Image (cartoon, grey):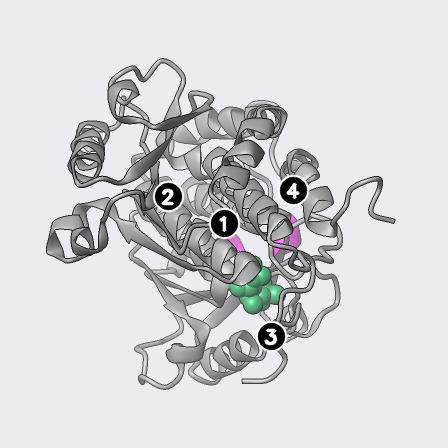
């Protein structure tokens, strides 16, 4: 049933091109117009939305953090992301024009369920992004957008995560289309770029041997750090979470711009640091992160750099270089997350841990 893989997690990592393609399937026309009629919210209701609050837990919340960048950019609607477990305890400001978007692979996470119940009591509209047909969260929501990742068995979410980002993007693009915002002409372009993403993910999978070797080299690490900027920041958080939960070693993700505000103090000789480098086209983000890489390397960090094809600026400062296909900045998480998943999986396997059932964790957390 693991289809020849040692772990469900490996199988599910390998299924990601399909999960992304299936989540896109049937949701846009050939000329890149979104069609999400299944969602049960009318275009008029969507035009009313003046604030979006994403609620989710763990990896799903990182999908939400990625989505915030895209949704605000395309729709110009303010978008917050909040851990579901915090949401209802802080008296959030909600009304009829607030769209609360929950993200949950299982559809059974208690904190997320409680958050959407609270949101509906406060008269907000609730749209849920979910991978499990007929589960509790979609049943209790005003609208649903399913991810079509197929069943996820391994406790650690992988294809769930990528398909959640894709579903959030479909929602963001649809809102932009309905509202006719000024970035609307990007919609068809982005849809076409999304269509190419499964091939990009496949390439990351085909190149995964070097990541597995790296994990074998780093088996003795006490701590591993992850840095990113913009949408690469939540990718760094996700890389760290995967490593913690599977390999049981200390790992932290940082926004690279925060280094000087504290985290750089923990950089010492030999500590492995993954750095997700944004595409060069993007403002000055790429240059800034290249200088961050120089800074940490000067302090002895072992740098593992994820950079797009053709970015030669990083080469002198990368102890290990992982290449990614050139994709638009907002889509980069869909390829960058893959080697981080493979790394965590391989390291945990090397340490002799049960990759699919990490200690102390359950696949769906149905208690608060
Ligand atoms: C991490 C992981 C968890 C889940 C979280 C939410 O690999 O799997 O952090 O993402 O428990 O679960 P769902 O998406 O089912 O609500």
Q: Quadrant of residue 176?
A: top left
Residue closest to the eye, 129 or 178: 129
Residue tagged 4: 13
Q: Are marks 2 and 3 in contact (CB under 8 Å)?
A: no
Q: Which residues are magenta?
A: 37-43
Q: For marks 4 and 1, give the one nearer the viewer.
A: 4
Which comes before the other along the chain, label 1 or label 3?
1
Q: Residues within 10 Å of mark 2 (few under 14, many from 20)?
A: many
Q: For marks 1 and 3, give the one nearer the viewer.
A: 3
Residue closest to the eye, 180 or 345: 345
Q: Is residue 211 left or right of residue 349?
A: left
Query: Going 63% across and 24% down the picture, which residue do you hit?
Result: 206
Q: Are marks 2 and 1 in contact (CB under 8 Å)?
A: yes
The label on residue 142 is none
Q: Is residue 92 above or below residue 18?
A: below
- What is the spatial separation of the Cα atoms under label 2 and label 3, in whole angstroms? 34 Å
SS at mark 4? Answer: helix
Question: Can residue 201 be seen in this snapshot?
Answer: no
Q: Is residue 124 left or right of residue 206?
A: left
Residue tagged 1: 168
Residue tagged 2: 70
């Amino acid at each position: 049933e693991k289809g020849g893989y040692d772990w469900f997690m490996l199988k599910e990592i390998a299924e990601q091109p399909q999960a992304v393609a299936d989540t896109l399937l049937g949701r846009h026309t050939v000329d890149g117009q979104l069609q999400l009629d299944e969602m049960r919210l009318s275009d008029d209701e969507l035009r009313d939305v003046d604030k979006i609050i994403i609620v989710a837990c763990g990896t799903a919340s990182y999908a939400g953090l990625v989505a915030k960048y895209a949704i605000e950019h395309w729709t110009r609607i303010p978008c917050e992301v909040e851990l579901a477990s915090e949401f209802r305890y802080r008296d959030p400001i909600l009304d009829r024009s607030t769209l609360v978007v929950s993200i949950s692979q299982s559809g059974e996470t208690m904190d997320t369920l409680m958050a959407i119940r609270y949101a509906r009591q406060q008269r907000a509209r609730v749209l849920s992004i979910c991978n499990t047909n007929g589960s509790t969260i979609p049943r209790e929501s005003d609208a649903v957008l399913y991810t079509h990742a197929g069943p996820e068995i391994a406790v650690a979410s992988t294809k769930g995560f990528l398909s959640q980002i894709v579903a959030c993007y479909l929602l963001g693009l649809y809102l932009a289309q309905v509202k006719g915002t000024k970035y609307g002409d990007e919609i068809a372009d982005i849809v076409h770029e999304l269509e190419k993403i499964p091939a990009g993910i496949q390439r990351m999978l085909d190149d995964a041997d070097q990541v597995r070797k790296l994990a074998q080299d780093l088996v003795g690490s006490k701590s591993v750090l992850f840095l990113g900027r913009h949408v690469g920041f939540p990718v760094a958080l996700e890389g760290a979470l995967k490593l913690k939960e599977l390999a049981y070693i200390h790992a932290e993700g940082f926004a690279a711009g925060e280094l000087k505000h504290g985290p750089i103090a923990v950089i010492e000789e030999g500590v492995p640091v993954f750095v997700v480098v944004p595409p060069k086209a993007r403002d000055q983000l790429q240059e800034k992160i290249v200088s961050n890489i120089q800074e940490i390397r000067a302090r002895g960090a072992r740098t593992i750099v994820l950079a797009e094809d053709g970015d030669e600026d990083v080469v002198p400062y990368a102890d290990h270089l992982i290449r990614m296909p050139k994709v638009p900045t907002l889509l980069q998480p869909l390829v960058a997350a893959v080697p981080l998943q493979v790394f965590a999986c391989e390291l945990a396997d090397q340490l002799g841990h049960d990759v699919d059932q990490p200690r102390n964790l359950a696949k769906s957390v149905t208690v608060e």
